[in-house]
Image: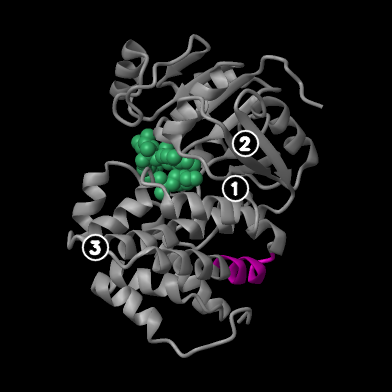
Amino acid sequence: MQDKKKTRVGVLGAGAWGTAVAIALAHRHDVMLWGRNTAAMQEMAAARDNLAYLPGHPFPPGLTVSADFDTAVAHAGDDGLLIAASPVAGLRPLLQQLKGRAIPNIVWLCKGFEYETGLLPHQIVQEILGDAVPGGALSGPSFAQEVARGLPCALAIASSSENLRNKVVSIVHGGNLRVYSTPDLVGVEVGGAVKNVLAIATGVADGLGLGLNARAALITRGLAEITRLGLALGGQAETFMGLTGMGDLILTCTGDLSRNRKVGLGLAQGKSLETVVSELGHVAEGVPCAKAVRDLAARRGVDMPITNAVAGVLFDGDQPQALVARLLARDPRDETGVK
Ligand SMILES: NC(=O)c1ccc[n+]([C@@H]2O[C@H](COP(=O)([O-])OP(=O)(O)OC[C@H]3O[C@@H](n4cnc5c(N)ncnc54)[C@H](O)[C@@H]3O)[C@@H](O)[C@H]2O)c1
Ligand SMILES: O=P(O)(O)OC[C@H](O)CO
């Protein structure tokens, strides 16, 4: 059952998503938002708005900000909620700062595979914190701007700990946020990671004016790629049809708020990857993830043609026009064959 008790929540990471989650939770809880840039946090505290990463969403009274890591971690106390809101690249250093501290739990929001190691976020957590701290991934179709505005949104908390799942649901579920629960960490994290790569592909196709048929084909065959990789890594088939699979894939491939989709649209305009990423001003996880997934899929013998085509454009100098041409040139095959 839902517990309406006010809880102390520490959000570690003050980008767009950490800020949006902090704003949404601060309407019902006592939330502290920490960011690593002291000057930016001071500006945020004065403006009560994250002008750099999520402008135009004033902070509710229940939200305080801090540039002091210890203070933010201590804010969650021994029975609150600690949320890691960094990109995947920042998760390992963040966890290293938490290692050895008494923390109640850790819930991470990042979506991707680690670039250098090809690890999923829960594997990084396991490597650094072990089993001592209950942890889980909170994921699903969720644009920061919409969550900060209080628009309806459905997420899923994935954790092997039933207690943690219940705790996250009791704290986060409420208002216009629905939170579903699942033990399938692998399935949830694979869906959240690979959809970013596929959103770059649909951005390229849409940017080239290839039409809605092409977009639907990319999304559907993209879901087949997510499912193949996810099953190979131990995820459950139903997860890929849920919020963190198909749901997030549809949102990110079709929603113009998506940073990954914007990368594809920019590449289709002939901009370099460097230019597109610097114009974005935010992380686009699909970029590092494309390489990590291509390497991992190759090692596992999983066929991921769309991911490979995206990685070819991002890293091998392939032209965006070649992306779809390369997919169309493949031999015909059974639609449902899983290889
Ligand atoms: N923005 C969204 O709508 C949204 C929604 C759901 C999930 N996510 C996921 O949440 C994660 C964070 O995304 P965001 O939207 O907050 O990104 P963002 O680009 O808006 O902000 C990134 C934040 O992380 C910090 N950062 C950047 N690189 C870092 C590094 N190497 N180490 C430590 N910190 C670093 C930046 O200073 C900044 O505060 C990503 O994995 C993203 O896929 C984002
Ligand atoms: O803006 P994107 O492409 O990073 O996507 C944001 C969220 O992951 C959508 O659920």
Q: Name the residue under label 1.
A: 125
Q: In which quarter of the image is residue 104?
A: top right
Q: What residue type is labelled 2?
A: Ile
Helix, strand or loop under label 3: helix
Q: Which mark is residue 268?
A: 3
Instruction: Return the residue at label 2.
Output: 106
Going 60% across and 27% down the picture, which residue do you hit? 176
Check if residue 20 falls in the magenta segment.
Answer: no
Sequence-wise first label, 3 or 1: 1
Magenta range is: 226-234
Please state the horizontal and vertical placement of residue 298, each as a whole percent of the image.
Answer: 50, 78
Q: Are marks 2 and 3 in contact (CB under 8 Å)?
A: no
Using residue 209 as the reference point, say whether residue 219 is left or right of it: right
**Which of labels 3 and 1 is toward the front?**
3
Disc 3 to disc 1, C-alpha distance: 36 Å
Work out how far the residue at label 2 is from the one at label 1, CA to CA, in angstroms. Answer: 9 Å
User: Would you say residue 92 is visible in this rendering?
Assistant: no
Left or right: residue 233 compared with residue 288? right
Q: Which x, y percent locates residue 271?
A: 18, 59
Q: Which amino acid does label 1 sit on?
A: Val
- What residue is at 40 percent from the left and 28 percent from the top? 35
Most foreground residue, 143 or 275? 143
| Residue ID at (75%, 48%) | 160
